[in-house]
Image (cartoon, grey):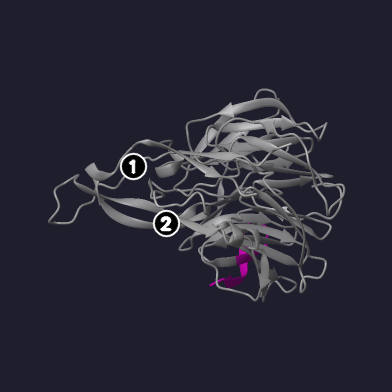
Amino acid sequence: MKKNALLILSFLTLTLFSCETNDNEEDGEFADFLVARPITMTRAEFANSVDIIDPAPIDESGKIYAYRDYIFVNDKYKGVHVIDNSNPESPQKISFIKIAGNVDISIKDNFLYADSLTDLIVLDISDINSIEIVNRLEGVLRDNVVWPAAEIFEWEDIDYENEILVGWETTVERRKIEEVRTDIFFEDAVAANDSGGDTGQGGSLARFKIVGDYLYAVDSHNINVFDISNLEAPQDLDDVYAGFDIETIFNRGEHLFLGSMRGMYIYNISNPATPTFVSEFEHGTACDPVVVDENYAYVTLRGGNFCGATESGLYIVDITTIEQPELKVIYPMDEPYGLGIKDDKLFVCDGSSGLKVYDKSAVPDLPQLNHFKDIVTFDVIPMEEQLLMVGDGILYQYEYLDNEIHLISSLNLN
């Protein structure tokens, strides 16, 4: 079992920057940097930070989750927007669940599990108009630290004795290059004290995954395992160390597929309480979600800035022999994030380059069927009846057609 302890925050501040300069600046002297500043609150505020309020504008679109007739959209570090999607042509915002430091959720049989920094929150959503907080497990997600894609972190003024870091605000600022340090910073921060049942569906960027009576939650190093056979009172089991820079989790059958900045790790969960390592596929450093069908894993790698120096692309990996994953082909991408599969279609959120739809029936050949440009895309969930996608503060829904998809609604979350 994990204990409340000191949480070592470590991060390498990268100095990848633009070389554009103003007319009165010398070439290379100044550059644009993505600067992150901490969002903090007192310990007392954090302990009482979960609340259900009226619908609110979204600040920064995060991950998306679907359950029955409802859609849940994460507002990064702040909580979850609840949307009634019983009529996909006219979705309606219902409420906002305030959860400090939240980036992920998962749902089974009307119980919603959410992270709040290192805590696991359990909510009863059986009455969507009267959501109740039923449990809080403190300190069970010990290494659940989510870093923004920033190049400079200004955290010197955090009062670690009295404040808790719950998230980051990022802005692009012009800085003098020689004044930007490239040190490795180490700071001590006290940590804050699909099958089986009716579960929902998350996107490829999810860090939470329910399989049967178990919830698997990946942090930067571990698979955190919880027995949720008693839905109101999850049992925190032993963590399974999985490596470094773990970012996402996907399930197919008795295997978990973990996406990391270093590669894809495959774990067997035939004994669900103790996932065991099977194999890995290594790649250059890059941000890395993954989805899987019968014989192939589809991995998007986003290079640049925080994600590393690897060129962005879609990697198709043959997992027919799951103990020996083999790269088959790489398709160039601009800035890919989430992706999803439905029957013979592959959907890729390529950031500001829009949503791209491919025919994967003859993989590794991948002809493009659609390209929805002029939208910013982040995460996608292919449902049975429609495709859900969240972008820059907008929830999109599409219907499937034979060889394409058609937009049926868009909801501005601001």
Q: In the image, residue 107 lies at what x, y percent?
A: 76, 55
Q: Amino acid at mark 1?
A: Leu
Disc 2 designates what residue? Answer: 170
Tell me which residue sits at (74%, 62%) in the image.
385
The reply to whether dot 2 and dot 1 touch (C-beta < 8 Å) is: no
Residue 57, compared with residue 247, is above or below; it is: below
Instruction: Answer left or right for 62 relative to 361.
Output: left
Asked if the stretch drawn in magenta spans residue 367, the answer is no
Instruction: Answer left or right for 264 relative to 375.
Output: right
| Residue 16 image label | 1
Q: In the image, residue 98 lies at what x, y percent?
A: 63, 65
Is label 2 in a helix, a strand or a loop? Answer: strand
Residue 316 in view of the camera: yes
Q: In the image, residue 183 lies at what x, y percent?
A: 35, 36
Q: Amino acid at mark 2?
A: Thr
Instruction: Specify which label sits upstream in the sequence, 2 or 1.
Output: 1
Q: Quadrant of residue 379?
A: bottom right
Q: CA distance from mark 2 to mark 1?
A: 16 Å
User: Which segment did they paint magenta?
Assistant: 396-414
